[in-house]
Amino acid sequence: MLQAQRNRYLENTVQTASPAQLLIMLCDGAIRFCRAGIEALKTTNYQDANTSLVKVQDIISEFAITIDRNAPVASDLLKLYEYFNHRLIEANMKKSIEPAEEVLGYLMQLKETWMQAAKQANGGTTSAGAMNG
């Protein structure tokens, strides 16, 4: 019952979110899965590490697919996303924490950047912080 309520809440949150809020939510998911992948690598649980790191790659691929190719920063962001995926593949193949930790740091910076951009676009206020709960 609780899970069904949570699923309805999440579905409603996603359906009513602005594009900026969706981007921040995806960043949150990528950060969460990246952390889970790192923890799984630390405990040599390679199946869970693979699952989590692939989820991060899927989210990053979604970023790349949906980017506005006409935006001035599009080509730089695409290169960055490509680099993230390269490092995540490296972490997964070599069972190495360092590349995943590097990507995690960048994802956290990227989320902060998107939050600042959303705040500026909304005239200084954003409900993005409420999505972390």
Image (cartoon, rainbow, N blue to C red):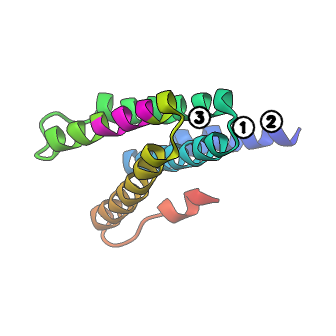
**Cα distance between the residues tagged 3 and 2:** 23 Å
Disc ID at residue 36: none
Which circle's residue, 1 or 3, is located before the other in the chain?
A: 1
Question: Tag 3: Cα neighbours inside 10 Å, few (<14), some, or many (≥20)?
Answer: many
**Most frequent secondary structure within the magenta stretch:** helix
> In the image, residue 32 lies at what x, y percent?
58, 48
- Magenta stretch contains residue 82: no
> In the image, residue 129 lies at what x, y percent?
52, 64
Tell me which amino acid carries mark 3: Ser
Disc ID at residue 7: 1
> Is residue 103 visible to us here?
yes
Assign a secondary structure to mark 1: helix
**Cα distance between the residues tagged 1 and 3:** 20 Å
Residue stretch rendered in magenta on the structure: 83-90
- The residue singled out by tag 3 in the image is 52
Assign a secondary structure to mark 3: helix
> In the image, residue 120 lies at what x, y percent?
28, 67
- Magenta stretch contains residue 84: yes
Tell me which amino acid carries mark 2: Ala
Residue shown at 34% from the left, 32% from the top? 86
Left or right: 15, with 112 as reference point: right
- 25 shown above or below 62: below
- The residue singled out by tag 2 in the image is 4
Question: Tag 1: Cα neighbours inside 10 Å, few (<14), some, or many (≥20)?
Answer: few
Assign a secondary structure to mark 2: helix
